[in-house]
Amino acid sequence: MRVNKPLLLILYNLPGLPLAEGYTRLMKHFGFTNLTVLEALSLMWMKEPNWVLGILAFLGVSTWETLLVYYSTKLWGTDYLPLKGMLIVMTCQAIIFSLYGILGGQSQLAQSVSGNYVHASGAAFGGLFVGYILKKFIIKPEQRRKDGFNKE
């Protein structure tokens, strides 16, 4: 039976939604940031934060980020995959915040330094998680050479 590895990785990434929301909600409660991750992602479409649109945005954004991490292994190999996943996810989140916050005129996305650190650390943890899941469960050692991973 053939398994669709990118789809499987996207499904493995779904438990990150409550973890990311819980982390940023806790940081919002303590006053480090003014937006949770779902509120921040919902600002791509509306001027006011909405967690329902945030869920849809999270599913779309995390899917693209996960696919980028998965297909980057064909270019960069699988060494230090959690760190590469962290780099890709943090870069994607920074681009999203810059595009919609600064260029899109969403003043709520322009946060304090602590707010930026909260969202950057959340993206870092998410990237480490994606890279770890990819390395541990998706790409098996015997499949790396056969599927084109780690070409020499």
Image (tube, grey):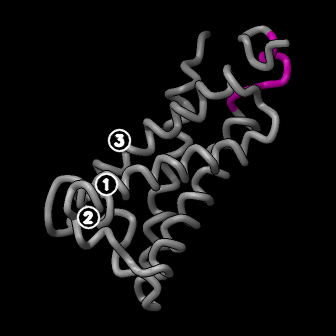
Q: Amino acid at mark 1?
A: Ile
Element class at badge 1: helix
Residue 55: image tag: 1
- Residue at 58 percent of width and 17 percent of height: 3
State left or right for residue 25 relative to residue 149. left
Disc 2 target residue: 51
Residue at the limit of the structure toward the left, as seen here = 47
Q: CA distance from mark 3 to mark 2?
A: 14 Å
Q: Amino acid at mark 2?
A: Trp
| In the image, residue 111 above or below residue 124 | below
Q: Amino acid at mark 3?
A: Gly
Element class at badge 3: helix
Residue 36 position, x and y percent, is 37, 71
- Residue at 73 percent of width and 11 percent of height: 148
Disc 3 target residue: 60
State left or right for residue 14 relative to residue 87. left
Q: Which residues are magenta?
A: 138-145
Q: CA distance from mark 1 to mark 2?
A: 6 Å
- Front disc: 3 or 1: 3
Q: Which of 95 and 4 lies nearest the eye of the viewer?
A: 95
Magenta stretch holds residue 141: yes
The residue carrying pointer 3 sits among few (fewer than 14), some (14 to 19) or many (20 or more) residues within 10 Å by Cα, namely few
Residue 105 position, x and y percent, is 20, 62
- Labelled pair 1, 2 in contact (Cβ < 8 Å): yes
The residue carrying pointer 2 sits among few (fewer than 14), some (14 to 19) or many (20 or more) residues within 10 Å by Cα, namely some
